[in-house]
Image (cartoon, rainbow, N blue to C red):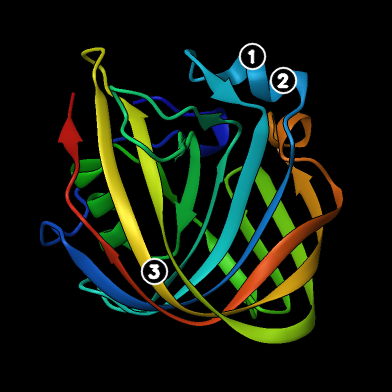
Amino acid sequence: MWSVPESTSQAADWPVSDPPPWPARVRATLWWHRSTSAARELGPGGRTVPMTLAMMVDYLDSPVGPYREILASPVLRVPGRRIGPMPRMAVPFIAVDSEASVHGGRTHWELPKVLAQFDGDVLGSTAAQGGGWKVNTAARAKGPTLPIVGALGFAQPTDDGRLALASARLAGRFRYARVDVESVGPTLPNWLVAGSHHGIVITEGKMRTGPATRK
């Protein structure tokens, strides 16, 4: 499974999760910055947009219960005939505090989920920590609360050379934010850049992540 060392996991008897779709209520902080050369080299190859997108998510409920998550895509895939009309993330780093969510990510979407510990509030200061890595975020929301409707797409490389394509559709409310980030780990500091970045906080949202199709 395509991943960075921070998101490499030994096989385990994870609790079996239900197949998608997965509806959920969420709160989240998202941030982005221009991709570093290390991010561009990391991949996933093909035509990409040099933009790194990352997020801390609090799933208030889901088919596997409440859990928290951090994920990052070093670059975005350019829309095209193979992946569809929207830019899509390719995620080599993702961690959660739910064993059933680890199973779901790895089994249903080719997402290399690993277990981590989380502290704090995703709309304020949050710390996520796993084996040999740590990410701290501090979000400072500014301005009015506005409606948001849209989708995030994934295009995950598979071991047989195909792509697992899936979309998460979201409706809710958000505010602009500045997000201060610190990252520690074997690779994260090279491509998940420390500093203050543009972002948003999703103060309330309903999300539905659909099944993956393989192309």
- The residues bearing labels 2 and 1 have C-alpha atoms spaced at a distance of 5 Å
Label 2 secondary element: helix
Residue appearing at x 23%, y 53% in the figure = 104
In the rendered image, residue 182, in percent from the top left (x then y), is placed at 81, 52
Badge 1: residue crowd in 10 Å (few <14, some 14–19, many ≥20): few
Check if mark 2's residue and mark 3's residue have beta carbons within 8 Å: no
User: For the N terminus, which image quadrant?
Assistant: top left
The vertical placement of 174 against 116, above or below, is below
Label 3 secondary element: strand
Give the number of the disc on residue 38: 2
Residue appearing at x 48%, y 20% in the figure = 44
Residue type pointed to by label 3 = Leu
Give the number of the disc on residue 170: 3
Residue type pointed to by label 2 = Ala
User: For the C terminus, which image quadrant?
Assistant: top left
- The foreground one among 121 and 210 is 210
Q: Is residue 55 left or right of residue 114?
A: right
- The residues bearing labels 1 and 3 have C-alpha atoms spaced at a distance of 30 Å
In the rendered image, residue 185, in percent from the top left (x then y), is placed at 71, 38
Residue appearing at x 62%, y 45% in the figure = 53
| Picture quadrant of residue 128 | bottom right
Residue type pointed to by label 1 = Glu
Q: In front of the other: label 1 or label 3?
A: 3
Check if mark 1's residue and mark 3's residue have beta carbons within 8 Å: no
Residue appearing at x 37%, y 41% in the figure = 154
Label 1 secondary element: helix
Give the number of the disc on residue 136: none
| Picture quadrant of residue 80 | top left
- The residues bearing labels 2 and 3 have C-alpha atoms spaced at a distance of 30 Å
Check if mark 2's residue and mark 1's residue have beta carbons within 8 Å: yes
Give the number of the disc on residue 41: 1
